[in-house]
Image (cartoon, helix red, strand yellow):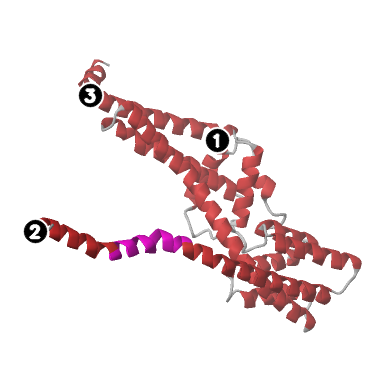
Amino acid sequence: MDLLSELWARLGAGEQAAVVGLLITCALAAWGLSGLATAGPGLSHRIAPPIRPRGMDDDPGATSATMRQLAAQLGRLSQRTGESDAEEIGELLLHAGYWSTRAPEIFEGLRITGLLAGLTLGAPSLVWFTLANAGLFTLLCSGLGYYLPLWILRVMARSRREDLLESFPDAVDLLVNSVEAGLGLDASFRRVAEQIETVSTEMGRELRRVHAEVTAGLDRNVALQNLADRTGLAEIRTWVQMMIQSERYGSSIAATLRTYAHVTREKRLARAEELAGQAGTKLTITMITFFLPVLIVVLMAPVALEIAMDMGRGTP
C-alpha cells in the first residue's frame, strides 16, 4: 500500500486524472457486462420474421461468431431504453436489409462498444487539456461513438429504399409478363427474382424471400405483408393491399398487376420530372456559391494588380 501511495504521489495531476478516467471506463464496461445476465428479452423477439427459411440468415463465415455473440450480449444492455426508440431501430434494420433475429442486439452492442471506445479515447486527453476541455472532448468522442452507427444505419436504410423504389416498376412489369405467360404467382416471384437481380440485387433478394416464405408454408398474404414491412415503401404497401384484396374477392391477378404496373410507371415518370424541375434551383445555388466568387476574382484581379503596381511606382 505504501508503494502504491508513493507511485501515486509521483504522478502529476494530469496523469492522475487520466488514470482515474481509465478506471471509470473499466468500471462502466464491467457494469455493462455484469448486467447482461439480468437483461430482458431483446427487440429481436418483437420484430423477428414469422419464418426464417434456410439460407436466409447471415453468413456464419462473414464475421467471427464470438464477436457477434459478444456484440449481441452488449446490445441487451442498451435495449433497456424506450419502446419507441427500440421499434424505430428495429424498423431501420429491416429497411436496411438486416433480417437476422439478432440484428437489433448486435447493433446495440456496436453502439455500446462505440460509447466505451469514445470514453477510452477521450480519457487520456486529461494529460494534455484542462479538466473542462478534456471532459468536453471525452463527451464528444463518446457521443460520436454512440450515435455514428445510428446515422450510418439511417443512410443505409434510405439508400436501400431508393434502390427498391427505382426497381419496383420493372419488377411489377416482369410479374405481369410471367403471370400472363401462364406461370403461377409463386413461381413468378422466383422467376422475377432471378431476372431482376441484374438491375437491383435488393429487389431480387426481397422477392426470393417472399418465394422462400411461401414455399416454407407461410400464407402468401402474410408473406406479402412481411415484404411491405421489410421495405417500408408506401408504393409496395399499396401494391400488397391490392394483391390481397384481389385474391380475397376473386378478381384477376393479372389484371390487378397490369393496372398497378401502369400506375408505378406513371409515378416513376412524375418523380423524374420533379427531379428535373429541381435541377435549375440546385444549379443556381451551386453557381452562386462556387462560380460567382471565382468569376469576381478573375475579373477584378487584373484591375487590382494594375492599381497596386501604379501605387508602387508612385503614379498619381
Q: Quadrant of the N terminus?
A: top left
Residue 32 image position (x, y, % from top left): 50, 33
Q: Which mark is residue 11?
A: 3
Q: Quadrant of residue 204?
A: bottom right
User: Answer yes or no: do the residues labelled 3 and 1 have beta carbons within 8 Å?
Assistant: no
The magenta span reads 285-299
Q: Quadrant of residue 25?
A: top left
Residue type at the position of mark 3:
Leu
Give above or below for 111 relative to 243.
above
Residue on which disc 2 sits: 313
Residue 48 image position (x, y, % from top left): 67, 51
Label 1: how many Cα within 10 Å (few below 14, some 14–19, many 20+): some
Q: Secondary structure at mark 2?
A: helix
User: Is residue 58 among what the camera can see?
Assistant: no
Give above or below for 119 relative to 216.
above
Q: Which mark is residue 36?
A: 1
Task: Estimate the spatial distance between the alpha carbons at disc 2 and disc 1, rounded to whole Å.
Answer: 80 Å
Most frequent secondary structure within the magenta stretch: helix
Residue at left offset 66%, top offset 59%? 231
Q: Is residue 36 magenta?
A: no
User: Is residue 246 among what the camera can see?
Assistant: yes
Comes first in the chain, label 2 or label 1: 1
Residue type at the position of mark 2:
Arg
Q: Secondary structure at mark 1?
A: helix
Give above or below for 303 relative to 33.
below
Label 2: how many Cα within 10 Å (few below 14, some 14–19, many 20+): few
Residue 62 image position (x, y, % from top left): 49, 59
Instruction: Say left or right for 146 vs 124.
Output: right
Q: Which mark is residue 186?
A: none
